[in-house]
Amino acid sequence: MSRSPSTGSVERGWDGPWYRVRADAFEASFLPSPDEDLDAVCNVDAEVRLEDGSRWSATVFTVAEVKRLMETWERTGEALEGRYFCCSDGLIAREPGIDSVTQVIADLPDSGELAQILQRLDND
């Protein structure tokens, strides 16, 4: 059974420029634009702290945002005219929004895939 940030103790809220989601096993800190609709976030930087103290980074995109970026780059000539997309700590989620992304992040440690997807920020 997947852990869900909607069960157990979960805190959500702004902390300066960061929007933080704190659950029992992790804290995810997102850096959306100040006026961005949190339910529509489709491209956002995040830092994840696990209960063991390790820190991880992610740049989260939705599938639709990747498509939009590649179409833009096709016109501007970036990324070989939009023929590829890459990001060292990229995580592509199907659905937009902080809650949707938080659900994906919450399930990564249990699936054993977190270390293959996110980039570790500390050396412990």
Image (spheres, helix red, strand yellow):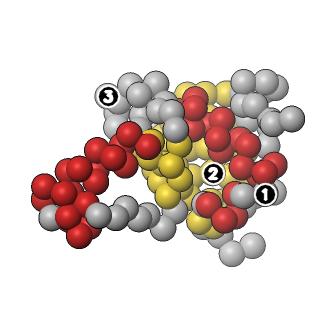
The quadrant where residue 7 appears: top right
Give the crowd class for mark 1: few <14, some 14-19, many >=20 residues within 10 Å: few
Tag 3: amino acid: Asp
Q: Residue at x 41, y 28 (%)?
A: 40
Query: Residue 85: horizontal and vertical position, in percent?
Result: 37, 62
Tag 1: amino acid: Gly
SS type, badge 3: loop
54 vs 101: above or below: below
| Numbered disc in front, either 1 or 3 | 1
Q: Do we see residue 31 in this rendering?
A: no
Tag 2: amino acid: Val
Between 18 and 100, the one lying in front of the other is 100
**Residue ranking furthest to the front:** 83
Q: Which numbered tag is attached to residue 112?
A: 1
Left or right, 73 with reference to 121: left
Q: Do we see residue 25 in this rendering?
A: yes
Which residue is under mark 3? 35
CA separation, marks 2 and 1? 15 Å
Query: Residue 92: horizontal and vertical position, in percent?
Result: 51, 49
Disc on the earlier residue, 2 or 3: 3
Query: Residue 30: horizontal and vertical position, in percent?
Result: 50, 42
SS type, badge 1: loop
Q: Residue at x 69, y 64 (%)?
A: 115
